[in-house]
Amino acid sequence: MENTETNEDFTICVVIPACNIADYIARAIDSVLTQTRTPDQIIVVDDGSTDNTAEIIKGYGDKLTYIHQENAGPAAARNTGIRNTDCDWIAFLDGDDQWLGGNLKLHCEVISNNPDIVWSAGNCISCLCGENRKAPTVNPDKAKKALAGKNYFEDFFTSFTLDIRGNSNTTIIKHSAIEQVGPFQHGLPYSEDIEMWFRMAMSFPKIGFIPEPIAIYHLNRPGTLSEKTTSEDKISTMCNFVRQSIELSKKQNCFDRFNPCVRYYLKRHIRGWLFQKDLATTIRGVISQFDDVLGGPYITLVKTLTVCPGLTSMILHGISKIVRILNLRKTVVKRPQKSD
């Protein structure tokens, strides 16, 4: 694809994984084709679709590169795209989400103004569109204040603990950096992007960030891999890659930087798990694995909350309902599921 809109001396490939998303894939592809900064290549990896996803993708002809593979998950699909491009930079978009028009142009500004940066992320809109609920994942004013006039953070781990980060739909990475840190971890049914970002930040702390939303993240699509994965499997997966990340940070002598980030990450997830009364035993197992990270006072608190998990769950659901009724929540999230 010829880039006629800019004079940058670098090329960009967009990698889009797709699996059984015939109702959404055209929306994603169209949002890339209408960018104010056109990409140099678009690769759509069909991850073993059994519906007519492939037919829709092939309908775009030479506007994109179509690759089919046996079903192996989004991480493997992204890796396939990465292996099949020679572009300098690689941007990612999930096939059931979409970009806003200025996504690539804004990333190019960050990249051009900061030659030492090898990755950049941005804000997005989280949308439960079927419920007519949408809002920026990060408050743009909060992000701008934290950036303090810059368009980058010195350390991804610091911005992460401030809850200012992008996702796979708003991230662009230099191809050579991916080759250095390694591809997405194949086989993770959950959080494969976070695992990758942790590894990236250990080697390349500095990250560009765009405070205004540059993509739309659709939360309510049925049949996603995450929905098919049980809570226990998600927790097990997360614990495994977090432990691996901790060990890697120690080998790379950056555990002191990583520790506050991983502590925040664990606490945020544990808070969500407490909504499910049937996860009390699992939660106790998690905090015992990471007592060196979480600290004694927090572990005591969680143990107390899991003594009567049904009561804890009822109270948390009650608080969540009040917050929802009073419209106090500033971001859009899926509502916690009640345990049977």
Image: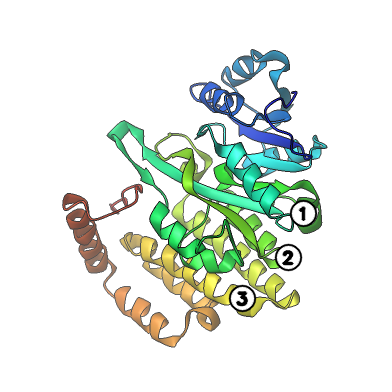
Is residue 298 depicted above or below 70 in this figure?
below
Q: Which residue is mark 3?
A: 257
Amino acid type of the residue that numbered disc 2 sits on in the rendered structure: Ser
Q: How many marks?
A: 3
Tell me if 289 is positioned left or right of 163 in this view. right
Residue 52 on image: x %, y %? 58, 17
Q: Secondary structure at mark 1?
A: helix
Is residue 71 depicted above or below 313 in this figure?
above
Query: In the rendered image, is residue 332 in sight?
Result: yes
Q: Secondary structure at mark 2?
A: helix
Residue 178 on image: x %, y %? 76, 51
Depth check, front residue: 284 or 26: 26
Q: Which residue is mark 1?
A: 177
| Distance in Å between CA atoms under marks 2 and 1 | 9 Å
On residue 203, the disc is 2
Amino acid type of the residue that numbered disc 1 sits on in the rendered structure: Ala
Crowding at label 1, few (<14), some or many (≥20) Cα neighbours within 10 Å? some
Q: Residue furthest right?
A: 86
Depth check, front residue: 301 or 201: 201
- Asked if the residue under mark 1 is in contact with the one under mark 2, i.e. CB atoms within 8 Å, the reply is yes
Amino acid type of the residue that numbered disc 3 sits on in the rendered structure: Arg
Is residue 114 depicted above or below 228 in this figure?
below
Residue 283 on image: x %, y %? 43, 69
Is residue 261 depicted above or below 174 in this figure?
below
